[in-house]
Every structure is written in C-alpha cells, then in structure tokens.
Image: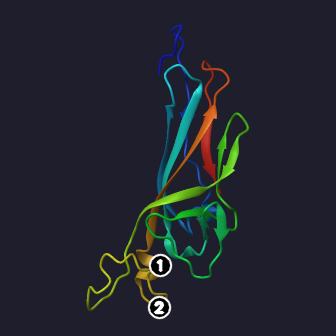
Amino acid sequence: SAVPGGRMRKVLALLLVSCSISSAQFKGGSLHWERVAHDSNIVRVTLRASWIRSSGTFVKIVDGIAQPSEGYQPVKGDVVNVLGYETPKFLFSTGFESYLQLEVTSNTEAVNDQYDFNAGLNLPHFNDHWSHNASNWIDGVASWDMEIPDPDMTYIAEVQG
C-alpha cells in the first residue's frame, strides 16, 4: 500500500506452525494484514485458523476471565484461548508476541448416525463416536493492531507452536 510521500509499506506475513502441535490439533489457516487508516503506520494482522475441537486445548473466556472446563468443546460465538503442550503464539518481527485468543466463527455439529435430532443445536461431539476425532473442527479468527516503525522495512508475522 502506498503511503504519503510515495513510500511503500512492506509487510511479509507467513503462517508457520511446528509439527509437534499441528499434527495433533491444527487443521489449517491464513494470516493477512491491512492498514487501519490510510495515513497511519498501524496495521491489523488477522489470523483465520481451524483446529480440532476435541483436542482439549481450549479455555473459554467470559468477560475477560478464563473459565476452564474439562471436556469443553467450543461453539460458534465463543472466545477461547488456544493452549497445548507447545502453546501456539503470534510473533511479529518488531518484538511483539501474543498467545492465541480466537473468536469461534463456526464449528462442526454432533453427528448422529441414525437420526438428525441434533441439527442446528451446536452440540459437542460424543467421546465414543467416530466423529469425535475425525470431523470435529472449529474455525476462528484473531487479530492484532500494531505500529510498524519504518514503512520502508519488511516485517515478518508468524504463528508458532
């Protein structure tokens, strides 16, 4: 994006997740950036990601307070911290880092092999059902606003875990 004075702002965004956590719970995602205002050095970096919902690595946040619950499976509208053995975090080359807190934008529904009584109820998958680990996903979004000191530099954004 061009900035006043003809200078160009450069930001390189990469999505990196190590195999130790990705093989267990990470499905995929994207990372992108945009300027918050035309005449500003503030950029918003947005992560959209999918995670297995039955991994047991989510803590629901209610009014800014963590609400741990055994067996919790996030549903659309929840805000969650993503945790794990190597808790994933967002890093930006200015030195900024943050653990992931996602707003859940969608989730798979519980599967009933015989009847569709649960459709639209956003119920968690059953522990002893094949779908618990096979098709039990959430999608979520997280964003961070940050100032880039020099619009002529290239910055790196990544997710590690």
The disc placed on residue 153 is: none
Count of marks, rendered view = 2
Answer with the quarter of the image where residue 147 lies: top right
| Vertical position of residue 76 compared to residue 126: above or below | above
* Residue depicted at 40% across the width and 74% down the height: 135
| Vertical position of residue 9 compared to residue 78: above or below | above
Q: Secondary structure at mark 1?
A: helix
Residue 137: x percent and y percent? 44, 69
Name the amino acid, label 1: Asn
| Vertical position of residue 160 compared to residue 14: above or below | below
Answer with the quarter of the image where residue 161 lies: bottom right
Name the residue tied to disc 2.
128
Answer with the quarter of the image where residue 58 lies: bottom right
* Residue depicted at 46% across the width and 81% down the height: 132
| Vertical position of residue 106 compared to residue 3: above or below | below
* Residue depicted at 70% across the width and 68% down the height: 85
Name the amino acid, label 2: Asp
Residue extending furthest toward the front: 63
Residue 51: x percent and y percent? 50, 64
User: Quick one: label 1 or label 2, which is nearer the N terminus?
Assistant: 2
Residue 95: x percent and y percent? 73, 38
* Residue depicted at 49% across the width and 87% down the height: 127
Name the residue tied to disc 1.
133
Q: Is residue 58 left or right of residue 140?
A: right
